Amino acid sequence: MPLNRRKFLTRSAATGAGVALAGAAAPAAEAASAAGPAAAGKPRKPGKRYSLTVMGTTDLHGHVFNWDYFKDGEYSDAAGNAQGLARISTLVDQVRKEKGRGNTLLLDAGDTIQGTPLTYYYAKVDPITAKRGPVHPMAKAMNAIGYDAVALGNHEFNYGIETLRKFEQQCDFPLLGANVVDHRTQKPAFPPYFVKKLHQPGLPPVTVAVLGLTNPGIAIWDKAYVQGRLDFPGLEEQAAKWVPKLRSMGADVVVVSAHSGTSGTSSYGDQLPWVEDAAANVARQVPGIDAILVGHAHKEIPELRVTNEKTGKTVVLSEPLCYAERLTLFDIELVFVKGRWEVESVSASLRNSNTVADDPKITKLLKDEHAKVVKYVNQVVGRATETLRTVDARYQDAPIIDLITKVQEDVVKAALAGTQYAALPVIAQASPFSRTSEIPAGDVTIRDLSSLYVYDNTLVAKLMTGAQVRAYLEYSAEYFVQTAAGAPVDVDRLTNAGGRPDYNYDYVSGLQYDIDIAQPAGSRIRNLTFDGAALDDAQQFVMAVNNYRANGGGAFPHMASAQELWAESTEIRTRIAEWVTAKGVLDPKDFASVDWKLTRNGTPVF
């Protein structure tokens, strides 16, 4: 895939003549380290001064408005947060008015085009890739707000490269990915960087370079789309390659927009040598960076200061809360010394979307797209005989999760009919993605089912042995906090041991088993049976799993290496809607089963 150079060669700042460049080619040069922020209390150097503000968002996941498509109403939560690019637009306008538009840049750290029914609709229902297809609402909104550059996130690849390339064409800003390279040529497949010169009357121009980095886990999570086409080397490696080049090109300020968290950990085990949450590693290991806009982890980090191991200088990191709930501001002070600009100080802070109203220009711009999606998600596809909830699904076997596994079992059985694997028993995996999803008694709509399965995962069939399934269940059971027999049980503290998220805890249908949480991790699965008898380790199963898990997401044992028997591109969410539509009536007797329970020394917890 050739580097996209057709756009972003020039751009004018609101005040002065700003010049923006995006590309990969740069002359080879020796590394040049950044002038880091001044230490607290250090005297200010004499000379001409310039104040730059770099604004940033991340993990927007298709949130344009403060609207919950799953609840069909305004978004609200206990913390009083507000969401959406319409709010961000108002905040950005405020900052530009305060600082002067020509003294600001606006960036994003990725995960833009997946995450809400709005983005699903324009990827699958009325796709932007169709002939004379629509402009993606996220492109419309971000163009109108005036983003300067956006790093690629892993979820940008969820709908395939064709959709991503179409979105790229519709954007007035570059999609950056220094560590996204063509598999054959190993050359950048997207612009690695963006450079903008800022001019103010009476001052030399300030050159700001933005390096975009994304998550190497894309090679696993979206293997079906990228394998043999794109490679994703590590962030540290690529930053070490590109930052010196940007400095040699005259960059006075280097900002990294990284779709990568700060923890230094990975959710895909040892399948790749690259770390998933590597932003802090980049700050420590690569000289020449002044600030890093962090993404991917969905955490709020107002300001994190990391010392570079080679220079001793400070790099400032910040991660605004996802879904456009926060806006990061990097305030960068520069002084002109000995014929060049030096960064004297960097500080970071957050602004909250709940302090402002929607920008009317964004509301007007996207009201039609919003209305189409609201109508779509409120389509009735069946009737439920009783209310189904996920509120306790993470620690009790809930019928609403059994619905997912039943659909997956049925789809895989039908797909394998007539093949050599048709006689093998089919079991299925599913996770309690949401703690608030509810399918009410009565009419069942697409939005009800979408709230149950919030990801755009697709279905894969893998061949597993009984022994491998046992190990899989033991690993999944690590999700629970060890709780001694007789000790009080607080359900709010019972799960997420070691920080494991709910989406990395799996039910497995078709088996019966206990999880003894009084036992240490690795020794919890008890009374594991299949078809009324103790599980035979040599027994073969077909396991229906989502593509994230099938490709190694969550690092479940044996899964990534297990033989793949079948896969499809239709979303599991769509399969659930089809199943309910075909049945007409959603009755737990058609799908619910009690497969597992929590125990302590053999005594049920609940």
Image (cartoon, helix red, strand yellow):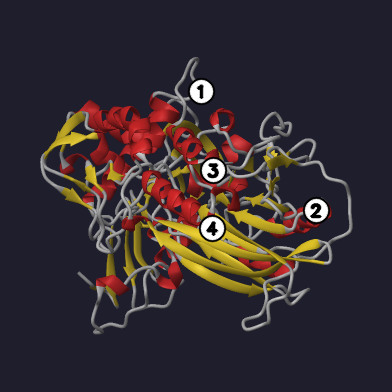
Q: Earlier in the sequence, mark 1 or mark 3?
A: 1
**Amino acid type shown at disc 3:** Tyr
- Relative placement, left or right, of 335 versus 598 is right
Where 592 falls versus 492 (above or below)? above
Looking at this view, is 396 or 527 the one in front? Answer: 396
Is disc 1 placed on a helix, strand or loop? loop
Looking at this view, is 332 or 555 the one in front? Answer: 332
User: Label 2 belongs to which residue?
Assistant: 250
**Amino acid type shown at disc 2:** Gly
- Categorize mark 4 by other alpha carbons within 10 Å: few (<14), some (14-19), many (20+): many
Instruction: Kindly check if marks 3 and 4 are in contact, taking CB atoms under 8 A apart as contact.
Output: no
Residue plotted at (24% across, 63% down): 78
Q: Quadrant of the N terminus?
A: top right
User: Label 1 belongs to which residue?
Assistant: 129
Residue plotted at (30% across, 35% down): 576
Is disc 3 placed on a helix, strand or loop? loop
Q: Earlier in the sequence, mark 3 or mark 4?
A: 3
**Amino acid type shown at disc 4:** Ala
